[in-house]
Image (cartoon, rainbow, N blue to C red):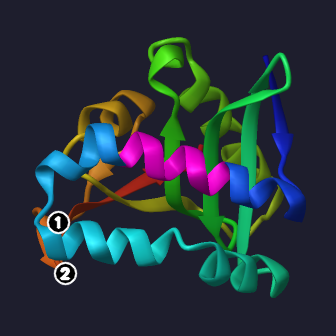
Amino acid sequence: MEIIKLQKNDIKNALNLVWTVFQEFEAPDYSKQGIEEFRKFVSYNYNIEKFDKGELYFWGCVDNDDLVGVLSTRGINHICMLFVNKEYHRRGIARSLFQVVEEKCKIQNNISKITLNSSPYAISIYHHLGFFDTDKELTMNGIRYTPMSYLLK
C-alpha cells in the first residue's frame, strides 16, 4: 500500500469512495437533510473548483492500483474528509493518511494544531489518533459533528 497526493484526474474516484463509505457508516446517524447536505459537500463540481483554487488537497491510499482510502484538507491543517474502504478498516490506513498531513503541518513553523469536525461514527478513531474534543456535538444543516483538535509536537 502506498500513500500518494491525488491529482485532478483522481478526484472523481476519491469522491465516489467517500460517498460509498459515508452511505454505509455515516448516513445512519444523519437526518435526510444531513445526508443531502453531505452529498452536496462531496459533489464533484464543488470539490474540483476548490481543488483548482488550491483550497482543498487530497491524499489517497492505493493498494494494487485501487484507491482504498482518502483524506482531504481545507488549507493545510483542517481535515474535512477521511474515509477508508470497509475492507481496509483497522489496517492503519487512516493513521498513515493522517501522518502525511501531520508532517506537512510540521514543515510550516506557524501551524500548531490540526482541526476537524468529526462525525459521530469517527470520534473514537480520531481520539485514537490523538485528537481531543474542543466542543460538544453540534448540528448544522442536518450534519452532526464534534469539533476536535490535535496539537502538533
Q: Position of residue 3 (x, y in %)?
A: 80, 32
Q: Residue at x 74, y 64 (%)?
A: 57
Question: Seen in the image, is 120 located left or right of residue 65?
Answer: left
Q: Which residue is mark 2?
A: 140
* Label 2: how many Cα within 10 Å (few below 14, some 14–19, many 20+): few
Between residue 60 and residue 106, name the one nearer to us: 60
Q: Position of residue 93 (x, y in %)?
A: 60, 24
Q: Quadrant of residue 128?
A: top left
Residue range of the region highlighted in magenta in the rendering = 14-22
Residue 71, compared with residue 35, is above or below; it is above
Q: Nearer the viewer, mark 2 or mark 1?
A: 2
Q: Residue at x 19, y 81 (%)?
A: 140
Between residue 36 and residue 104, name the one nearer to us: 36
Which type of secondary structure does the marked residue at label 1 adopt?
loop
Image quarter in which the N terminus is found: top right
Question: What distance separates the C-alpha of mark 2 from that of mark 1?
Answer: 14 Å
Q: Residue at x 45, y 13 (%)?
A: 90
Residue 70, compared with residue 48, is above or below; it is above
Give the residue type at disc 2: Met
Q: Which residue is mark 1?
A: 135
